[in-house]
Amino acid sequence: MLAAAGARAEAPATLDCRDVWKAFGGIQALRGASLSVARGEIVALVGPNGSGKTTLINVISGHHAADRGRVELGGATLTGRPAHEIAGLGVSRTYQIPRPFAHFSALDNVALAATFGSARCAAAEARAEARAWLEFTGLGRRAAALPHQLNLHERKFLELARALAGRPRVILLDEVLSGLNPGEIASAVHLIRQIRERGVAILFVEHLMRAVLELSDRVVVLNEGEVIAAGGPREAMRAARVIEVYLGKAHVA
């Protein structure tokens, strides 16, 4: 299993994005976006709809190629690599809408993920690894269930188990709390903290401001593809430009 986090303040940057640009036709989705996430650190990526958050996640994970800029993981260049190579170097992700293999059980979905990523388990080891991650995410009793037999909360946690099965150094969470009720959100927040304590660097996209303030060590705010604020959660969310373009003072009172 993954090692404990250690001292986050002294940890070197695990993930480093510098001056990342991305356009789709005439739409400039990212405009020189930069951020870093250290080992065992939680960084929230927030901003209005269409601000470029998911695009940046897609560039980091290799699902989109950056037009300019660089992405590095522990000094190794990720820019220009395909998604499967980036996964093999230790970057895992979830999706806002869970994407399990519909005809595979929860166990088999996670076992398949364990054969990729930085661990690259053999088949027998992958199933044992999968059971461990299902237990970790509270899905141990649902190992035989097919995805359509799981509720949204369980499917979201299955996404997390699949991402963790690759033994990531960095995990990218795209609105993992979306659609959950308050009790499920509390459970997810607890789980994310446990992941952090294992030393994983976490970059998460989220609209739920209470969770952002509660969970994150730092916040990066995007607007129209540009970083407009970065820093401690309350400091970043109270920046004048953030309030102007995104929040409104009531959210940070």
Image: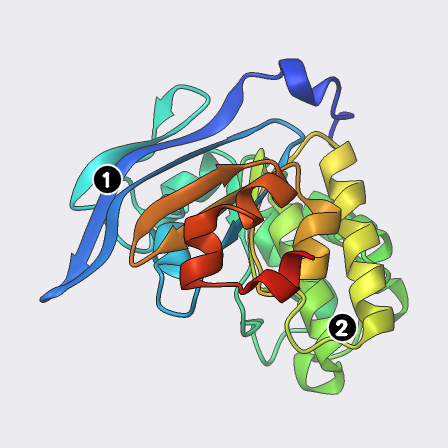
What is the x, y in percent for residue 51?
36, 61
The amino acid type of the residue labelled 1 equals Gly
Q: Secondary structure at mark 1?
A: loop
CA distance separating discs 1 and 2: 34 Å
What is the x, y in percent for residue 209?
65, 60
Q: Are marks 1 and 2 in contact (CB under 8 Å)?
A: no
Residue 151 lies left or right of residue 30; in this view the side is right
Tell me the number on the disc at residue 154. 2
Residue 28 lies left or right of residue 164; in this view the side is left
The extreme left residue here reads 26
What is the x, y in percent for residue 253?
69, 57
Q: Is residue 166 above or below residue 17?
A: below
The foreground one among 231 and 93 is 231
Quarter of the image for the N terminus: give it. top right
What residue did someone put label 1 on?
80
Which residue is at 64% across, 33% downward? 41
Question: Can you see residue 53?
Answer: yes
The amino acid type of the residue labelled 2 equals Glu
Disc 1 residue crowd, few under 14, some 14–19, many 20+, Cα 10 Å: some
The foreground one among 154 and 220 is 220
Q: Is residue 251 above or below residue 152?
A: above
Question: Can you see residue 116?
Answer: no
The extreme top residue here reads 10
Quarter holding residue 140: bottom right
N-terminal of the two: label 1 or label 2? 1
Residue 183 lies left or right of residue 178; in this view the side is right
What is the x, y in percent for residue 111?
66, 55
Quarter holding residue 178: bottom right
